Image: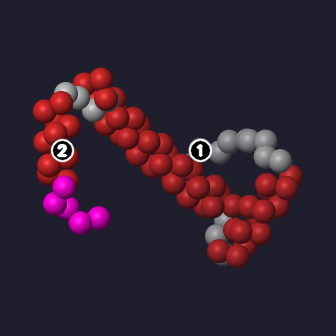
Amino acid sequence: MAVKTVVAIPDDVFRRVDRLAKQRKVSRSQLFTAALIRLLEAEAKDELTRAYDAAFADDRRDRFTDATARAALAGVEW
């Protein structure tokens, strides 16, 4: 099932989208859908990163955790 919608896009962006869709041999709708899916997936990853950062924020760490992490990483070749 698909939902039709109307969005306002600047002319120059529309021309670029049109060219890219032709190059890839897909419809503009397919191109817009693919772009939006990538944006939504990236946003989900960003939300996960923010949640992880909040859970392990500096104010929640202690000296033992820092020392343990340093010791564990000391032997890792970067």
Work out whether 21 lies above or below 61.
below
Q: Which residue is mark 1?
A: 3
The residue sitting at 23% across, 66% down in the picture is 77
Work out whether 54 lies above or below 2.
above
Q: Position of residue 35 (x, y in %)?
A: 58, 55
Q: Which residue is mark 2?
A: 69
The residue sitting at 73% across, 41% down in the picture is 6
Q: Can I make out residue 44 in this image?
A: no
Q: Amino acid at mark 2?
A: Ala
Q: Do callouts 2 and 1 mark residues in contact (Cβ within 8 Å)?
A: no
Q: Position of residue 1 (x, y in %)?
A: 51, 49
Of tags 2 and 1, which is closer to the observer?
2
Q: Residues within 10 Å of mark 2 (few under 14, many from 20)?
A: few
| Residue segment shown in magenta | 74-78
* Residue 32 falls within the magenta-colored stretch: no
- In which quadrant of the rendered view does residue 29 lie? bottom right
Q: Position of residue 26 (x, y in %)?
A: 64, 70
| Nearer to the camera, 77 or 47 | 77
Number of the label disc, if any, that sits on residue 71: none
